[in-house]
């Protein structure tokens, strides 16, 4: 819990609009003031880094390999580089993790065989995770690109098709390829709004995703709660 004056967490969204996601709800429960920012809608990223205790960059349909189509992502990647260089807590989720990797000069690319990772997939901790994961964990995915691990970073979790699932840079910056913030409601909205993606190789059917959600959602939620209780401080 923050002590004294309420601390603020910057939430960077793509493409825009506040989310009913697990991460923002849990941070609010922990006593943080939330400040939403959507560079794609013209919101400026803060110049005074010290005004925020931590930053979270969410996922989105954009690609760091198509910066000409979404030029604001270049500004965002540069901002993330400055934020992390200042040794401030950062959590990048899916696209946000890929932007962190790119800010640290690592590549982001599609799977060699064209797989999409959509649905619940098991990841496994590496020895460098140091207790961040108690063991293998089923987590939710929705992506078709993956990041390389930046030089100087530690790989924390691996997966079967996209081997790099989580990394830590320094003590406070984390990049995740998966979506621990996704609630059942968010999952069902994505299934409805992006149903065309479910025809891609590697994508799980809506029926399988909903069945898996009943089994794995609570374990993923407990992991994110534990992470957020210690990470921003």
Image: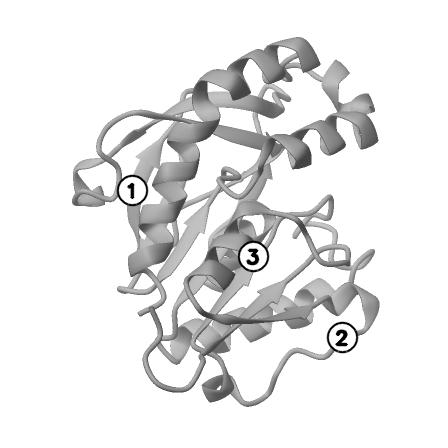
C-beta proximity under 8 Å, tags 1 and 2: no
Which residue is at a point 36% across and 66% down the rendered structure image? 232
* Crowding near the residue tagged with mark 2, few <14, some 14–19, many ≥20 C-alpha atoms within 10 Å: few
Q: Which mark, by number, is residue 99?
A: 3
- What colouring does the structure picture have? one colour
Asked which quadrant contains residue 47, the reply is bottom right
C-alpha gap between disc 1 and disc 2 = 32 Å
Q: Which mark, by number, is residue 132?
A: none
Q: Does residue 201 appear to the left or right of 80 in the view shown?
A: right
Which residue is at a point 64% across and 22% down the rendered structure image? 114
Towards the viewer: 34 or 129: 34
C-beta proximity under 8 Å, tags 3 and 2: no
> Disc 2 marks which residue?
43
Q: Does residue 194 appear to the left or right of 56 in the view shown?
A: right
Q: Does residue 78 appear to the left or right of 135 in the view shown?
A: right
Mark 2 falls on what kind of element? Answer: loop
Towards the viewer: 141 or 35: 35
C-alpha gap between disc 3 and disc 2 = 18 Å
Percent position of residue 212, x then y: 52, 15
Q: Earlier in the sequence, mark 3 or mark 2?
A: 2
Q: Given this view, does label 3 or label 2 mark the residue nearer the observer?
A: 2
C-alpha gap between disc 1 and disc 3 = 17 Å
Above or below for 123 versus 170: above
Above or below for 43 versus 174: below
Q: Which mark, by number, is residue 156?
A: 1
Q: Does residue 11 appear to the left or right of 89 in the view shown?
A: right
Q: Earlier in the sequence, mark 1 or mark 2?
A: 2
Percent position of residue 58, x then y: 60, 53
């Amino acid at each position: 819990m923050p002590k004294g004056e309420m601390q603020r967490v910057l939430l960077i969204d793509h493409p825009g609009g506040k989310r009913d996601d697990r991460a923002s709800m849990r941070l609010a429960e922990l006593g943080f003031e939330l400040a939403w920012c959507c560079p794609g809608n013209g919101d400026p990223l803060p110049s005074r880094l010290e005004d925020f205790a931590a930053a979270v960059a969410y996922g989105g349909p954009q690609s760091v390999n198509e910066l000409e189509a979404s030029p604001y992502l270049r500004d965002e990647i540069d901002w993330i580089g400055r934020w992390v260089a200042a040794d401030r807590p950062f959590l990048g989720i899916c696209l946000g993790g890929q932007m962190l990797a790119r800010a640290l000069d690592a590549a982001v690319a599609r799977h060699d065989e064209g797989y999409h990772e959509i649905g619940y997939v098991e990841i496994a901790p590496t020895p460098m995770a140091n207790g961040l994961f108690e063991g293998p964990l089923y987590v939710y995915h929705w992506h078709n690109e993956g990041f390389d691990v930046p030089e100087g970073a530690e790989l924390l979790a691996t997966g079967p098709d996209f081997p790099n699932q989580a990394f830590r840079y320094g003590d406070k910056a984390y990049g995740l390829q998966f979506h621990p913030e996704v609630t059942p409601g968010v999952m069902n909205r994505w299934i409805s709004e992006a149903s065309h993606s479910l025809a891609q190789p590697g994508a799980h059917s809506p029926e399988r995703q909903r069945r898996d959600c009943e089994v794995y959602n609570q374990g993923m939620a407990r992991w994110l709660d534990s992470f957020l209780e210690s990470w921003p401080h």
